[in-house]
Image (tube, grey):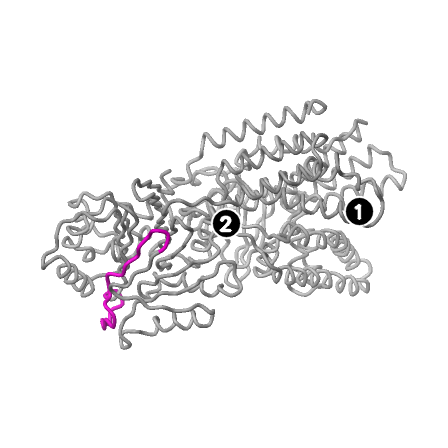
Amino acid sequence: MRKRPLASACLLIVLFFYFAVSLLPFSPRGLYEGEKRKVKVTGKVYQKEVRQQAGQAVRVLYLKNLSGDSPPGKGALCYLKSGQAEPEMGSIVTVEGSYKEFETASNPGQFDSYTYYLISGISYRLNQAMILEKTVGYSKTGEALYRFKAFLSRRLSENLPEKESALMKTILLGEKGELDREVKELYQRNGIAHILAISGLHVSMLGMGLYHVLRKCGAPMKVSALAAAILLLLYGTMTGFSVSALRAILMFFLHMLAVMLERTYDMMTALSVAAVILLIGQPLYLEYSGFIFSFGCVLGIGVLTPALTEGKGAAFHRKKKAPARMLKLFLSALTMGVITLPIYLWYYFQFPFWSMLLNLVIIPLMSYLMAAGILLLFASVVFPFATYPLGHMIQGIFKIFELACGINEKLPVHMVTAGKPAFWQMVLWMAVLLLVIFLKKRLALWTRWSLILLAVLALVWRPGNKLAVTFLDVGQGDGIYVETADGSRFLVDGGSSSVSGVGKYRLLPFLRYQGTKKLDAVFVTHPDADHCNGVKEILEQNVTGDIRVCCLILPDIGKEARNDAYKELEDVAERNQVPVAYISRGQRLQAGGVSITCLHPQKGYGAEDANAYSTVLSLTYGNFSALLTGDLEGEGERELSAYIRKQEGGQIQDTGKYTVLKAAHHGSAYSTPAELLDWCRPYYTVISCGENNSYGHPHKELLGRLADCGTDVMVTYETGAVTFETDGERVWVSRFLQE
């Protein structure tokens, strides 16, 4: 770094930003008390797009420089009501709509919409917005670029099928509103979603392409560089300046500046300067996966690839024979896997194992795809007859992409689900990479790769010597995860009546965060939707997904009590090759020193009310114990109390035997009676319910009984996920939203 003083200085500035962001966290809530109320917002239109919602095209405005009586914030996302006239770019508008904050993550692994949009300069959204006022003045350049983009978008729609048209709009124009969700998820699962972002390849083809064309046409070097820089600025403005685009365009500007000043261009210095410029504008980019991926990959290519393909013991790189070239190409691909592995695990908890080799096919084809797309747009205006072969070429390349992804997903170890690494593992990883980079000339190539292999093993290792019980925030519903010291994993319920797609957006992300590859058993206490609709989503992905369910366990009730919802659960399990078992009073499951005993219902129990036959589980591990009560109430609670009296000689004793109680039926007034509380006397009580739910849970009557009991009460919509870790003696409690 002594040869790069500017890069070294920029690195120190980046480290300063990192520690500032880490030590001074922002508050994710409390922007405005007007949730769901109609508000007026005045701001400047800086971006427009069309998004698909429930099969309908909705126009969306991005506003900045909010003023007047607008709710506080940096920017607003406005979903216009149908029929509203579209304002011009750069105009000042006043809109009125229903205010809504973005959702903050309340569970480990859950996507944090609030932080994502805050990093992008958006503080809240307005639904069904109506434009009340609009200024006459606007940005003529901005509006002209927007209309040119719309013109290009129409040309792609006219000359390509719907799916391929949406993909090309995303790749060339940065329009993601029409992108097919299944295709997007296919690319994400296979580690090639980066091709959907405006990045260095666009800069290379457009900016450097124009520069070289002008130079060959005899234009002066400085004029060519300036023209190329202006083109990239206009292109970035038109496509919306994503983080990867900003990084690539800033580096290109520095390259052209070096050309105009007749100085040597250094990629690593340009990368460092670009990082500092972006972080000055938004320090929270250090929390954003797109920023880390974009800069991390370029940094890896510039620094780590030479360290793992050249130097001592790498004489093959000087040979020009095909085997030597293939070996170097293979090691370069492995190096990209080394670079992206920790980033994938930190943000997505999984790593598409073969993506590094798949990209050897995808990335070279991307140059042809983009060239074909640009030529198609040109031909659609000048030579319409030439669009036919170009369109077929584009379709063919996309078919190759899908075919390659399909083959990739059938390979063994397609997806490595290792969970989120601990901070010390990331530090160890970085230390090994720095060691390999600085000792490149002293260590043999095989030694460097051996160190990398050890770092990989350390990164994916998940030590487990404790029991962990997590009560997830699933809104109005239940979801409890149990992981034993020996790595056995169980789920007790998983559903919600207030969170749409609770399995996809809360349960599965949490399981991946934990590094869960299989669930040894999933207990469903009863078949109400707020306890099992997320479980169904997990069962549906059992054959093709990345998390396998070994067994579904249902309450062993009488045939007459098994309603349609109960039978549907059995059918879903059967369709997805999940064995079904049944549990009743006295049956026990043991794993890793943990004993899970069923206290209710008795075998063949015939209550018609699903809540009455809700499974009650008693979990014990050393001195730790938890009572999981589902939605038990009414007749079922009386039956359980009678059983406890019988076990204790006719009278329920004040035993104080439970560490944790999961309050029954989300904290309803008549569940968890005083008699049951007197028996279990829990140190902690968790109430799982949604904020502002229509049932009024938790009811004040129950809260009063819990206060009299002296238990520490935690409500999931206030605390987020609550986790109890124990070694059988000590207990550690963590609350996701209050840490």
Report the number of numbered marks. 2
Q: Picture quarter containing residue 289?
A: top right
- The quarter of the rendered structure image containing the N terminus is top right
Q: Three-letter amino acid code at disc 1?
A: Arg
- The quarter of the rendered structure image containing the C terminus is top left
Q: Three-letter amino acid code at disc 2?
A: Cys
Which percent across, then down, holds residue 12?
Answer: 59, 25
Is residue 430 located in the magenta-colored stretch of the structure? no
Kindly report the secondary structure that dominates the magenta region of the rendered protein: loop
Helix, strand or loop under label 2: strand
- Residue at 76% across, 39% down: 314
The residue that label 2 is drawn on is: 78
Are there few (<14), some (14-19), or many (20+) residues within 10 Å of tag 1? some
Is residue 607 located in the magenta-colored stretch of the structure? yes
- Residue at 44% across, 62% down: 549
Helix, strand or loop under label 1: helix
Which percent across, then down, holds residue 626?
Answer: 27, 51
- In the visual, does 463 lie left or right of 711? right
Q: Give the spatial CA distance, label 2 vs label 1.
A: 52 Å
Question: Quick check: can you spot residue 200?
Answer: yes
Question: What label sits on residue 514 in the rendered view?
Answer: none
- In the visual, does 3 lie left or right of 562? right
Question: What label sits on residue 325 in the rendered view?
Answer: 1
Q: Which residues are magenta?
A: 591-612
Q: Nearer the viewer, residue 21 or 561?
A: 561
Which percent across, then down, holds residue 179?
Answer: 60, 58
